[in-house]
Image: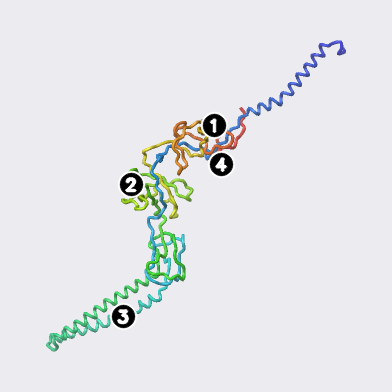
């Protein structure tokens, strides 16, 4: 059978071929469309999230000061001498009674030797005058000596007794001076500041070394007199210490001075750490505190979790297994703590992205992973519908 004899068969064959070709051309496009419809899931680890919380420190009184040791001692020279040895340096621990600095004791030892010889001579003189007095008393009772001789003997005995007492005092003083050539730790602690070196000549009253007890750290700060009416002994304080990465420390106001500084018009406030074991062990660090007055409580979030677009702001909230773009209304900003008050849009306990970056979509699936499994909320995995 020829093709010319059956034109209908020819048309049917050509149409079938065209349909097959069209179908073959559409298959890659369909695959591409399916692939495009796959939704990227956001991999989120616990460290990528931040929980919305309330704070009672909004507008609270600010304390500025430093961390200091409540138990500290400034050891000064009690004798004039040359420094022979420095046994402990800055940062080294000391036990009570340990020698920290040793001074030259040569001249003081000579004085002690001289005082001891004078004491020996005074003792002998007193004993001799005492024997003479006893003999004069015996002779006077027998009528063999006059009353004047007895009184003279008693006067010599009394003078010798006074010389003996003075000689004993000089020996005690010389021995005390000798002990003062060794500067010892008054309590268990750490050498915080050494101010002399071997060969230095120190005079009486010169500061030699400072010793602190790191277990007695506390916050010593000042507050403006205008805010004095808001603080009381026993109130909680949130402390931030410069150079310490542990975050905030909890404390309690322990003492408020009764007089303001005549120059700054600020009042000194002392606060103790609630957990002394975790308190900073370095004295002199700058610190800032916020007193929890409890007068105003509001929801707060760090600025890094908030995305601003002109006059509007939003956060990326975790809504079950999806990412939700939530508009928020902002309030007061705490420049010191880097937090912003959230007026509307969130409630306490809501979870938001800590640092939203990259391309995020409203309704995007969320996949939770173990700690360290995501990188600040920017890693994604394709999840097919």
Are the residues tagged 3 and 4 within 8 Å (C-beta)? no
Residue 233 numbered tag = 2
Q: What is the distance, in whole Å, between disc 2 and disc 1 at their CAs? A: 46 Å
Residue underneath mark 1: 323
Q: What is the distance, in whole Å, between disc 2 and disc 3 at their CAs? A: 60 Å
Relative depth, front residue between 45 and 86: 86
Residue underneath mark 3: 118
- Say left or right for 198 vs 295: right
Are the residues tagged 2 and 1 within 8 Å (C-beta)? no
The numbered mark, 4 or 2, whose residue comes first in the sequence reads 2
For disc 2, the neighbor class at 10 Å (few under 14, some 14 to 19, many from 20) is few
Residue underneath mark 4: 372
Question: Foreground mark, 4 or 2?
Answer: 2
Query: Could you say which quadrant of the image residue 136 lies in?
Result: bottom left
Q: What is the distance, in whole Å, between disc 3 and disc 1 at their CAs? A: 95 Å
Residue 225 numbered tag = none
- Say left or right for 14 vs 191: right
Relative depth, front residue between 55 and 133: 55
The numbered mark, 4 or 1, whose residue comes first in the sequence reads 1
Look at 18% across and 85% down and name the residue there: 135
Give the position of the C terminus as an image quadrant: top right
């Amino acid at each position: 059978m020829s093709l010319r004899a059956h034109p209908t068969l020819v048309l049917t064959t050509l149409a079938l071929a065209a349909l097959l070709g069209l179908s073959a051309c559409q298959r890659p496009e369909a695959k591409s469309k399916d692939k495009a419809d796959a939704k990227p899931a956001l991999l989120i680890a616990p460290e990528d999230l931040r929980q919305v919380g309330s704070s009672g420190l909004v507008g609270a009184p600010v304390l500025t000061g430093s961390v200091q040791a409540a138990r500290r001692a400034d050891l000064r020279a009690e004798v004039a001498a040359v420094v022979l040895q420095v046994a402990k340096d800055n940062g080294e621990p000391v036990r009570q009674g340990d020698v920290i600095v040793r001074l030259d004791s040569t001249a003081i030892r000579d004085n002690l030797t001289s005082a001891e010889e004078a004491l020996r001579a005074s003792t002998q003189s007193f004993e001799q005058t005492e024997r003479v007095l006893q003999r004069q008393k015996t002779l006077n009772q027998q009528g063999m000596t006059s009353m004047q001789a007895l009184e003279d003997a008693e006067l010599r005995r009394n003078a010798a007794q006074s010389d003996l007492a003075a000689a004993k005092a000089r020996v005690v003083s010389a021995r005390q001076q000798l002990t003062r050539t060794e500067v010892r730790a008054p309590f268990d602690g750490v050498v915080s500041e050494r101010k002399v070196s071997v060969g230095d000549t120190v005079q009486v009253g010169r500061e030699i070394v400072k010793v602190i007890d790191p277990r007695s750290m506390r916050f010593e700060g000042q507050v403006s007199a205008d805010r004095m009416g808001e603080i009381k002994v026993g109130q909680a304080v949130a402390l931030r210490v410069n150079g310490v990465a542990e975050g905030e420390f909890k404390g309690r106001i322990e003492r408020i001075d009764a007089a303001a500084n005549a120059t700054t018009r600020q009042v000194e406030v002392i606060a103790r750490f609630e957990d002394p074991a975790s308190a900073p062990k370095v004295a002199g660090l700058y610190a800032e505190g916020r007193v929890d007055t409890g007068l105003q409580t509001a929801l707060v979030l760090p600025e890094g979790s908030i995305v601003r677009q002109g006059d509007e702001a939003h956060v990326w909230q975790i809504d079950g297994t999806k990412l939700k773009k939530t508009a928020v209304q902002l309030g007061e900003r705490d420049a010191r703590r880097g937090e912003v008050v959230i007026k509307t849009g969130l409630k306490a306990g809501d979870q938001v992205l800590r640092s939203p970056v990259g391309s995020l979509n409203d309704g995007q699936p969320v996949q939770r992973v173990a700690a360290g499994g995501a990188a600040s909320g920017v890693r994604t995995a394709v999840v097919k519908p």
